[in-house]
Amino acid sequence: MNNCDVCGNATFRRKQVEEVFNIEDHLVMVEGVPARGCDRCGDATFDRQTTESIRRMVHGVNRPTRHVNMDVLAFA
């Protein structure tokens, strides 16, 4: 992956992001995910190992480190 899928930029930096996943109508947020972030638009992508680790976390028996309330908006 050489260029950003969103804007076509070719420069990136490592960063940590939060991602929210909808698992069978249950929202799960994973914090501190290592990602490659586009320097221009900020879009984050994950390598294969990180993606597999996230999959195991959200489908496994990991206990949450904390709980948050979240507002849900419908795009109409």
Image (cartoon, rainbow, N blue to C red):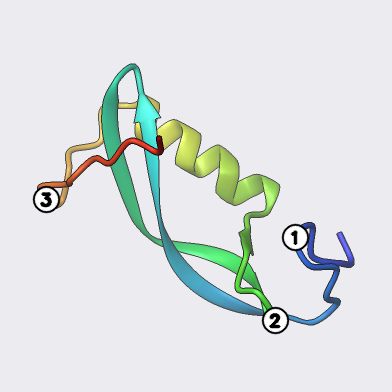
Residue carrying label 1: 6
Distance between the alpha carbons at the discs numbered 2 and 1: 10 Å
Q: Can you give x and y, in whole percent of width and height, for residue 53 in the image? A: 50, 42
Say the numbered circle drawn on residue 68: 3
**Figure quadrant of residue 43:** bottom right
Three-letter residue code for mark 1: Val
Distance between the alpha carbons at the discs numbered 3 and 1: 30 Å
Is residue 64 toward the left or the right of residue 18 in the image?
left
Q: Can you give x and y, in whole percent of width and height, for residue 62 in the image? A: 25, 36
In this view, the residue in front, 62 or 43, is 43
In this view, the residue in front, 28 or 75, is 75
The residue shown at (86%, 67%) is 3
**In the rendered view, would you say 33 is above or below 75?**
below
Mark 3 and mark 1 lie on one chain; the one further toward the N terminus is 1
Residue carrying label 2: 40
**Figure quadrant of residue 22:** top left
Three-letter residue code for mark 2: Arg
Q: Residues within 10 Å of mark 3 (few under 14, many from 20)?
A: few
Q: Look at the numbered disc 3 and give the secondary structure of its residue.
A: loop
Q: Can you give x and y, in whole percent of width and height, for residue 56 in the image? A: 44, 32
Question: Are dots 3 and 1 in contact, CB under 8 Å?
Answer: no
Question: Are dots 2 and 1 in contact, CB under 8 Å?
Answer: no
Q: Look at the numbered disc 1 and give the secondary structure of its residue.
A: loop
Is residue 38 toward the left or the right of residue 63 in the image?
right
The residue shown at (29%, 38%) is 28
